[in-house]
Image (cartoon, rainbow, N blue to C red):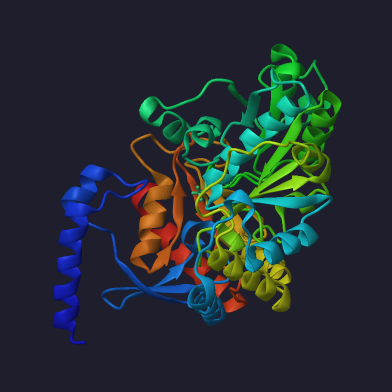
Amino acid sequence: MTDQLYTAKQSELEELDKRHYLHPTTIPKAHAEQGPKLTFSEGEGIYVRDLNGETYIDGLSMLWNVNLGHGQQELAEVAKEQMTKLAFSSSFAGYSNEPAVRLAEKLAALAPGDLNSVFYTSGGSESNDTAFKLSRFYWSLKGKPEKKKIISIKNGYHGVTIAAQTATAIPLFHDFAGSNISDVFHANPHLVNCERGDKSDPHYEGSIRHIVEKEGADTIAAVILEPVQGSGGVHVPPEGYLEAVRELCNEYGILMIADEVICGFGRTGKMFGVQNWGVVPDLMSVAKGISSGYSQLGAVLIKETIRDVLVQYDQVLAHGFTYSGHPTACAVAMKNIEIIERDQIVANTKNMEFELQAGFEFLKDKHPTVTKTRAAGLLAGIELYADRDRGLPFHPSVLPSAEVVEECFSRKLILRALSSNVGRNIVAIAPPLIINKQQIEDIITILDDSISVFEKKFC
Ligand SMILES: Cc1ncc(COP(=O)(O)O)c(C=O)c1O
């Protein structure tokens, strides 16, 4: 194809995009006027290409989900094979299919503890809504229908369906379209002492424990949290936090839901995020990395004692999605997990975390603005401050993370600015888990150059 044809096709697509395509999590006015930032056309490994033939490093695995990287032929082949054989079948009314059953067995074997049953969805928001509904339903079957309230923690992102949006404690998403449900509370995050019961801690008010005591444990169905927060800023919890929340839930008879939508399937250097702290939740929401983004799939994993109650119900469980247990999606997920295990992707993630951390040390040494670097596997972030020693952010007219991310983009590295936090200064880095040492170095080199330009402009 000649360059001219490329250009013609691209401008046609841009016009059609502007006219007909309302994009998620995008500024509609800017998009309607300017069109797409770029139009992806191909991918291979950690790289993606656009219609102009420009190659970019996908430093965020797109939406933290393309864990095995782009252009994975085995996933494409298994999808074709399953589609040819049986693309879709219903899972309602007792119907079943082999890929869904095999995957359920595999997930039960992989998951920590006795999370041995699976309810399928088509994505993360649906998984969290499902986890809320199953929690409430469980308590209702146990004769406690008043246990309905959900507690999430601030900076948590749980999706955009109405219940998941309400639990999401990032104002930009939480407040959208005034769509919240009642009975959802946001606790202050990562207060280890308070969750352990230290009422003398000055931060006690607003902790999960404080909310439980104020509202009454007999009104609370579940606590939901990400093992490592993603979209809220890549916040790794302090040691002891997840264990303290687990203990608190045990103490008060509250279900613990781990939102593993980003953390699951190797992202944090363990198969599941909670395994970094040896915690077993009661319900676990997964999506994204379950299929490395090659098919739309999510699931809620359910522990035995909950399942034992649910399976006593002798009427219709009136919940489910058309695509619950989608055979093609499940076949892709099965192959995805097989490759993660065969190619020791989780071990690679941990090794590459060390490379990334070494790169972060270099950036901190060289750049006075860089601080608070962190990585749990390949779920990583850095922060930029005007005065890092005194913790002073840049003037509000400067958007440090957006500036650096744009500089990286112009050098063909895609990262994400997490800018709903005070100071708007977090840059997220989460490349595909198949990345190698040289490619990590390439990311650090681009970050180094980009931060230099940013510092020249604003320091
Ligand atoms: C932790 C977490 N939970 C839930 C979701 C929602 O998933 P989905 O966009 O597939 O509905 C996301 C999406 O980014 C997420 O990061």
Residue 371 seen in render? yes
Q: Viewer-proximal residue, 369 or 444?
A: 444
Horizontal and vertical percent position of residue 327: 57, 65
- Quadrant where the image shows the N terminus: bottom left
Looking at the image, is 331 positioned above or below residue 189?
Answer: below
**At x 64% / y 52%, what residue is drawn?**
94
The residue at 47%/26% (across/down) is 180
| 374 or 30: nearer the viewer | 30
Query: Which residue ends up furthest to the bottom in the rendered image?
Result: 1
> How many labels were placed on the picture?
0
**Percent coordinates x, y for residue 347 in the rendering:** 73, 70
Question: Is 424 left, or right, of 360 in this rendering?
Answer: left
Question: Residue 28's spot in the image, x, y percent?
Answer: 25, 44
Q: Is residue 203 visible?
A: no
Q: Position of residue 382 (x, y in %)?
A: 55, 51
- Residue ID at (34%, 51%): 457
Tell me which corner region of the image, top left, top right, bottom left or bottom right, holds residue 351: bottom right
User: In front here: 190 or 142?
Assistant: 142
Q: Is residue 418 above or below residue 360?
A: above
Q: Nearer the viewer, residue 47 or 109?
A: 109
Q: Quadrant of residue 239?
A: top right
**Which residue is found at the position 63% from the left and 38% from the top?**
316
Side (left or right) of 398 relative to 390: left
Location of residue 254 with respect to 322 vertically, above or below: above
